[in-house]
Amino acid sequence: MTNKKDYQISLRRYFVLLYLIIFLITSLFGMATIVFLKECLHVTGSFTLWLLIYSIVILILGALIMWFGSTHLTKPISDLNQSVKAISQGDFSRKIVRKSYPKDRATYHNEIDELSQNINQMAEDIKNADRHRSQFIANLSHELKTPISSLVGISDLLLTDSLEKDTRTELTTILQSESLRLSRLCDDILNLTKLENHLSPQLESVALDEQIRQALIMLTEKWKNKTIHLEFDSEAVMCQTDPDLTMQVWVNVIDNAIKYSSDQVFLNVDVKQATDKVLVTISDKGIGIAKENQRHIFEQFYQADQSHAQEGNGLGLAIVKKIIDSLNGSIHFESTPGQGSRFYITLPTNQ
Ligand code: ADP
């Protein structure tokens, strides 16, 4: 490795140096003009003294102008430099404030202002992403803690020799359901991470009505302890989409419709084709969602209804929303507490 010396040369010095060079060239040019006037044109008079005075005044004035002018340019650059350094060290609250003149009627922008604005925006984005990441980790740790501590507790109990057969079976069932919960959580987090990394959807031709039918069969099997009154009204719909992703949408939304209903589930699924999109409506007559909770249900780990908290992890609809966004579709819903919910999902038939 070569041991190079490192000099820091301020921009201000460059400007002054540049000015001196310009000054030197114009002075030389002035002197050449005098010589030409005297020698070639034989013009008489003392130009030299005037040229000297003129040069000194210009030199001082020019250097001062250059010095203050370059300060105007280099000061914001060094402010920017400080801020970027602070941001890179994790101080995302650092803001670059450009000088403004309160009496001015208009605002003025130059490239440095634009750069400052972009850096401020970048810091804000990083700050949000950082907050989001910390929140995600906190929520995740909380979600992991419950099943893991019950797994530890139950496996301790199972080691007890004197345990009766029935108790042992009961504990093993809980152990199994908690392990499943943990595995579901891991799957959901993997899915979310994949979606957040913007992996592009794998498009193929999918018979959506058939896919929703399969999801319904799978879920009625899963929820066979409930009585499901199903109305399935579907047109044959072919869609250019990612089958793995759309399947997750149907499974999550229909699963919720059943989960948040009493033992008597009234489920209505409607699939309609419009010109270039497919509209899927999934309605239930379950517990519904309170008005104040409605705007949060697509947030990660958000659970509006704590009585069912053990049956989910609050990631299902966050995944659904991300999938639908990545497929350029839309999702919205209406819900009345005590009467039920209706989710409207739209997907383009051709991506
Ligand atoms: P979870 O795993 O808790 O079901 P989701 O992300 O799927 O999480 O849903 C977020 C929250 O939205 C749920 O905890 C629930 O309170 C509410 N929710 C979602 N779908 C319905 C529905 N069909 N009926 C009532 N509440 C619902």
Image (cartoon, rainbow, N blue to C red):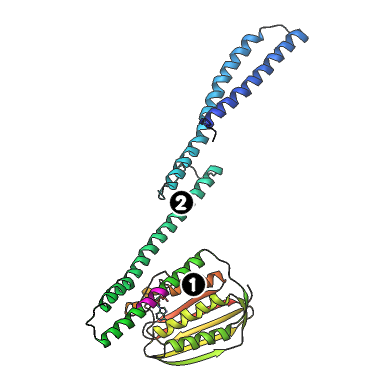
Question: How many marks overall?
Answer: 2
> Considering the numbered disc 1 on the image, is that residue within a helix, a strand or a loop?
helix
Residue 327 image offset from top left, x and y in percent: 57, 72
The residue wearing badge 2 is 123
Query: Which of the pair 220/280 is nearer the observer?
Result: 220
Residue 312 seen anywhere in this rendered image of the structure: no
- Dividing the picture into quadrants, the one containing residue 285 is bottom left
Residue 77 image offset from top left, x and y in percent: 50, 39
- Dividing the picture into quadrants, the one containing residue 48 is top right
Separation of marks 1 and 2 at Cα, in angstroms: 26 Å
- Magenta segment boundaries in residue numbering: 178-183
Is 150 magenta? The answer is: no
Task: Give, as a three-letter code, the residue at label 2.
Answer: Ala
In percent of the image, x 47 and y 40: which residue is there?
A: 81
The numbered mark at residue 193 is none
The residue wearing badge 1 is 321
Residue 22 seen anywhere in this rendered image of the structure: yes
Residue 51 image offset from top left, x and y in percent: 63, 13
For this view, does 320 lie left or right of residue 202? left
Q: Report the magenta stretch's main SS.
A: helix
Verify CB contact (< 8 Å) between mark 1 and mark 2: no
Q: In this view, does 73 lie above or below 215?
A: above
